[in-house]
Amino acid sequence: MQSIADGQPLGEILTSRQKWLLVFSLMIAMFIGAIDQTVVATATPRILADLGGFDLLSWLFTSYMLSSTVVVPLVGKLSDIFGRKLFVLAGIVLFLLSSAACGAAPTMVSLIVFRAIQGIGGGMIFASVFTTIGDVFSPAERGKYVGMFTGVFGLASILGPTVGGFLTDHGGWRWVFYINVPFSLIAIPAIWVNLPSRHGANRPRIDFLGAILLSVASVLLLLSFEWIGNQEYAWNSAPVLSCVVVAVLALLAFVYQEARHPEAIIPLHLFRNRVFVLSNVIVFIVGMGMFGALQYLSLFVQIGLGASATASGLITTPQSAGMLVASILGGQLIARTGRYRVQSVLGSTIVLGCMLFLRTVDVDMVKWHISAVMVVLGFGTGLVMPTMALVVQNAVPYRYLGVASSSNQDVRQIGGVYGVAIFAAVLTSSYEGAFTDQLAPSVRDRLGPEVVTHFEDPTLPLNPAEYRTVTATVAARDGGQDLLAAASRAQRESVGIAVRDIFTGSAIVAGVGILLCVFLKEVPMERRFRPAGEGEAAPAEQSPPALVVD
């Protein structure tokens, strides 16, 4: 074993061959977590057919998101103290076991529970992988490697629906979870051999209370907005208001705890760093304005354009191809120049242009036009999101690398959830007004209040059982086919109007993102690791334990 001085980065002691072996090992781990997020959606109809529990469907994804979001900041801080290896390996093992449990789940409730555990493993993997890149490569070098890892994520997004569909059709939906097991078994020994460990006699005080308070605040805020986004509760309902109030109180208590604890989960002095704050705000804005809005593009494609769920995935998936190309090219450019502001502004401008295009969608649009703009949108996103991951790492001393990386991932996830909730309100409000205008009074009178009520739900065609019942009822009447065509056309047009309003709001948010990128201070990417205390004040804390290379 080779001993490394306290706080010394891995990049200063690993050979070029060791670095590439480690990069390949981390890519395997990254691919495992990334592809799981896309293959499950493809298998959802078969899962419902086998296990039932349609009313619990949203929790199949919400449970994963909540648990992964909660674990990221804690793992980020602890990995700064104890090293990344422990958490990468623990995350992969937990992901392996929970994936096997998901595949064997006998009920929807048990599947949701196992998905929550799987989210913890996935959160540990993602929180550690990008931070480890910062351990191995200096800020100026990180660009091309972060771009490669973002490319892996994009590749997983492209392959996921196809792989998920193939496994579901030929082996059953349980294999979309079982497939994680062999990949995990490959990743574990690769990480074990190629990622150095951190050992030391120091045992700093862990801020468990801060971790609990942050977890409570995060879960309750995310849960309340998830409820709103899924239209389970209104904004002013008791469950939502209760969650928000308790979350705010927990957040205030968290800030007080962080101000007094020597090993804060998120050191408050980092918020005096303008670049750290602004880059995270940009990620939040992009997550809210783009990822939040894009959730409803599939709704338009399936209802407004009459495409199937599979076709909807094929239409929107090309975004990942654009992101794959842009993240690699953008990373290489940053690695060569050490500059990032122009690239960030360009990427944000491309995103704005795509949002402006998407606000022109209508029911007569050619489907491939949307696919084309999704490629361009992915390209713009690929220039911004990986860049902000680099910026936030470059903005802080090396000892806070894990904290910085995890904060970047967290605010992106939270921004997306908030965007989904906000645009859900836009969808509901716009659709109601548009449907009233689009449905002729004579048609409304002939359909009757009970049938009209069903069509006032924009997601009616996505619930096959209810939709068949409603259409059969209408078709059985005199002139039923004409009535059904008029009601369906009104619904499609109204969804298009609502989605256009959503992308109008998204374009406004994207415009704010451009302004923030313009005012982002450009700190040149350094070709060496930045020691603690250089360039900013940091409180005196214990030195991190020494590193040992196996």
Image: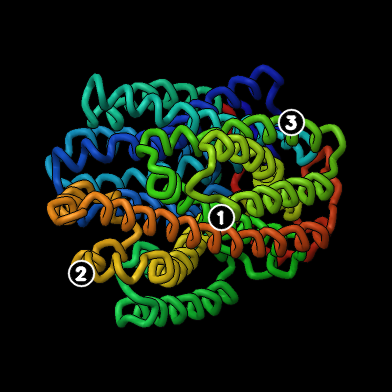
Rendered position, 238 above or below 122: below
* Residue underneath mark 1: 412
Q: Earlier in the sequence, mark 3 or mark 1?
A: 3
Of label 2 and label 1, which has the lower sequence position? 1
Residue 508 lies, in percent from the top left, at 66, 64
Name the quarter where the C terminus is drawn.
top right
Residue 131 falls in image quadrant: top right
User: Nearest the camera: 372 or 484?
Assistant: 484
Which tag is nearer the camera, tag 2 or tag 1?
2
The residue where tag 3 is placed is: 329
Badge 3 amino acid: Leu
> How many discs appear?
3
Residue type at mark 1: give it. Answer: Arg
Q: Residue at x 31, y 65 (%)?
A: 456
Amino acid type at image mark 2: Gly
Q: Which mark is residue 448?
A: 2
The extreme top residue here reads 17
